[in-house]
Amino acid sequence: MSDAQKAALSPEVVLQEMKKNGVTHVVWLPDSETNWLYLLMKAEPSLTLVGVNREGLAFSAASGIAAGGKTPLILIQNTGLMESGDSMRGWTMGMNVPVVLMVGYRGWTRHGVNTDTAATYTERFLNAFGIQYYLVEDGADAGRISIAFEEAKKTRRPVAVLVADEYHGFN
Amino acid sequence: MMDTAELLKVYNRYRGDAIVVPGRGGKHWVNISTKPNRDLPLGDPAMGGHASFAMGLALALPQQKIVLFDSDGDIQMGMGILATIAEQQPKNFYHFMLDNECYATTGGQPVPLAKTIAYDVIARACGYPRAYAYDNLETFSINIERILGEPGPVFVALKVSPDIENKPIGSRVKWRKRSQVQVVMDMQKELGIAT
């Protein structure tokens, strides 16, 4: 196993973070950055997977789940996050819903020049809405997922985890 | 076409202890309901999301009957949620849809295919096991008790007369008596949900 593979964000660790933070429902739309979680989530009996077909619907669904006293997690791609602006505003920010958004950071790169406008606008979009976010690049960053849950609970607002860990061998 | 307030009065006779998300029927429902702590009159947090919100509530509260009064404009904005609801099959979810054939709050412009679209057929094709459509109060009144006795998810399209509003939003009468956050908290308190 290469050093890069050893450092990669393990899907097991992400699932453990979900369980540790009491997630009951994952409202999601598949994306290329987090597809490695699907089989694990599907096999996890404590999770209900709620698949939507437009990311904006994830925010209203999560709002309803939270109103019913359960703990949703929204799992989408940054492209879909940007599509969801009004729903995020009205159904989660406006209703004080403490929810973590796990967002696949398509196009993100630490090296060279970014060539994907999905990445160009992701953090600008979150900043425009005043949404706090945490970058998770590899396994060493996994603890930031719990920090996001704590902050969401404390502030009663959405908090984003940007998953910048594509192409690590699980795909 | 039915009058929305009259339709909601008929429903209220059979409500029981259901949690009601009145959607765009909210301005009538707040004057009809006798169980406000089991109501979630949210106004319009963001158009197109009422069905997914109510579905989420139904998934989180499987022991409660969840009744939604959605609208045609909302459904058209997020029609994909019908497939999600059909996939989840919440047995406690009753999805009524007020079809006034227009965007009443913006002046009454027609929704696409306002007079010909068959929402009940779409819901059934998506996988709702039961879907109905009514355009008069008498038939609705005859069937409502039976419908509420069936396992969900159930979809019911209801033709209603539009309550068209042409005033600027800022000058309209405010019908909501509680904030969105407050109505959720009141329901949670009523049900003993710790947050």
Image (spheres, grey):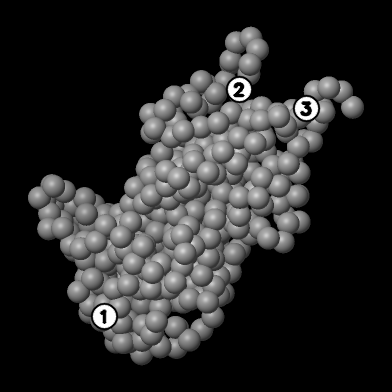
According to the picture, the residue beneath numbered tag 1 turns out to be: B34
Residue B82, image x and y in percent? Answer: 51, 61
Q: Earlier in the sequence, mark 3 or mark 2?
A: 3
Q: Front-most of A136 and A52? A: A136
Q: Are marks 3 and 2 on the same chain?
A: yes
Neighbourhood count class around disc 2 (C-alpha, 10 Å): few under 14, some 14–19, many 20 upward: many
Neighbourhood count class around disc 3 (C-alpha, 10 Å): few under 14, some 14–19, many 20 upward: some
Marks 1 and 3 sit apart, C-alpha to C-alpha, by 58 Å
Which amino acid type is shown beneath numbered disc 3? Ala
Say the numbered circle drawn on residue A108.
2
Q: Which secondary structure, mark 2? A: loop
- Residue at horizontal 57%, vertical 35%? A161
Instruction: Establish if B79 lies above or below A163.
Output: below
Q: Please report contact status of discs 1 and 3: CB closer than 8 Å, yes or no.
A: no
Whether residue A156 appears in this view of the structure is yes
Residue A14, image x and y in percent? Answer: 69, 42
Q: Quadrant of residue A163?
A: top right
- Residue at horizontal 45%, vertical 88%? B146
* Chain holding disc 2: A
- Residue at horizontal 58%, vertical 69%? B89
Instruction: Establish if A117 lies above or below A93.
Output: above
Marks 3 and 2 sit apart, C-alpha to C-alpha, by 17 Å
